[in-house]
Amino acid sequence: MQILAGLKVIDVTQFISGSRCTQLLADMGADVVKVEPPEGDTLRINFQLMPGAERCYSVLNRNKYGIAVNWQE
């Protein structure tokens, strides 16, 4: 049994520290939903500029659900 099973978390973070925090919550069983704009969040865009860094984005967002939201509309 995971200690945070049943906890719902909305992740709207855009920096490594926030993604790491919600990654730990997801690893402990929380249902985490990563919300980002359609073009991708800051980390996703910045990691595209560094060779091999896309793995870091994948690790930071493992065990999370994802959704793209256009906040302008």
Image (cartoon, rainbow, N blue to C red):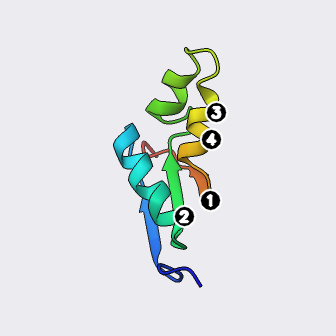
- Which numbered mark, 1 or 2, is in the foreground of this view? 2
Disc number for residue 27: 2
The earlier-in-sequence mark between 2 and 4 is: 2
Q: Residues within 10 Å of mark 1 (few under 14, many from 20)?
A: many
Q: Marks 1 and 4, how far apart in space? A: 10 Å
In the image, residue 56 lies at what x, y percent? 57, 34
- Which numbered mark, 2 or 4, is in the foreground of this view? 2
Q: Residue at x 48, y 81 (%)?
A: 3
Q: Secondary structure at mark 3?
A: helix
Kind of residue indicated by mark 3: Arg
The earlier-in-sequence mark between 3 and 2 is: 2
Kind of residue indicated by mark 1: Asn
Q: Which residue is mark 4?
A: 58
Disc number for residue 55: 3
Kind of residue indicated by mark 2: Asp
Q: Quick one: quadrant of the N terminus?
A: bottom right
Kind of residue indicated by mark 4: Ser
- Determine contact: label 3, label 1, CB under 8 Å: no
Q: Residue at x 56, y 32 (%)?
A: 39
Q: Residues within 10 Å of mark 4 (few under 14, many from 20)?
A: few
Q: Residues within 10 Å of mark 3 (few under 14, many from 20)?
A: few
The earlier-in-sequence mark between 1 and 2 is: 2
- Determine contact: label 1, label 2, CB under 8 Å: yes
Give the residue furthest to the front: 1
Disc number for residue 63: 1
Where residue 22 sits, quadrant-wise, is: bottom left
Q: Marks 1 and 2, how far apart in space? A: 7 Å
